Amino acid sequence: MSYFKRSPGGEPDKFLSRLGSVTWILIYGGLLTLLLGFWVESGNDSIRRLLMASGALAAVVGVVLIYIRSKMNSRQ
């Protein structure tokens, strides 16, 4: 069982490739933004909270996309 499932014709499915790319961009970008929120000076609490919340949300959406991808069948 592999992460990159192939379509019935043998060619890789472009939708699934894009979904994989978006998934990992969301996870890594979200974690980077979350860490940036930790490093913002304490005088900017509103910016800090915004960065941390948006980073955590992006990372969670990426993890949810991994779960959704695992339950998908190859498109016909």
Image (tube, rainbow, N blue to C red):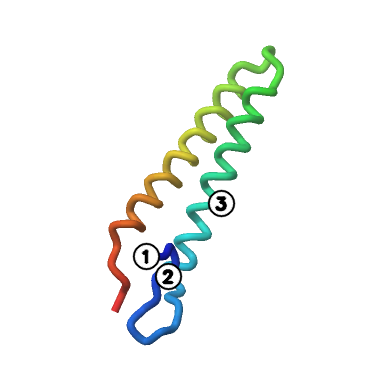
Label 3 crowd bin: few (<14), some (14–19), many (20+), radius 10 Å: some
Three-letter code, disc 2: Phe
Disc 2 to disc 3: CB gap under 8 Å: no
Q: Mark 2 — residue?
A: 15
Please state which of the two labelled residues, at mark 2 or mark 1, is closer to the viewer.
1
Give residue 32's quadrant in the image.
Answer: top right
| Quarter location, residue 7 | bottom left
Neighbours of disc 1 within 10 Å: few (<14), some (14-19), many (20+): few
Three-letter amino acid code at disc 1? Met
Specify the farthest residue to the bottom: 9
Q: Residue furthest front?
A: 1
Q: Residue 58's spot in the image, x, y percent?
A: 49, 41
Measure the alpha-carbon separation of dots 2 and 3.
Answer: 15 Å
Q: Residue at x 50, y 56 (%)?
A: 22
As displayed, is residue 15 above or below residue 58?
below
Q: Amino acid at mark 3?
A: Ile
Q: Nearer the viewer, residue 2 or 55?
A: 2
Percent across and percent down for residue 28 are 58, 45
Mark 1 or 3 closer to N-term? 1
What is the C-alpha distance between the residues marked 1 and 3? 23 Å
**Image quadrant occupied by the C terminus:** bottom left
Q: Residue at x 29, y 62 (%)?
A: 72
Residue on which the image places disc 3: 25
**Helix, strand or loop for disc 1:** loop
Which residue position is annotated with label 1? Answer: 1
Label 3 sits on a secondary structure element that is helix
- Up-down: is 58 above or below 25? above
Q: Quadrant of residue 51?
A: top right
What distance separates the C-alpha of mark 2 from that of mark 1? 19 Å
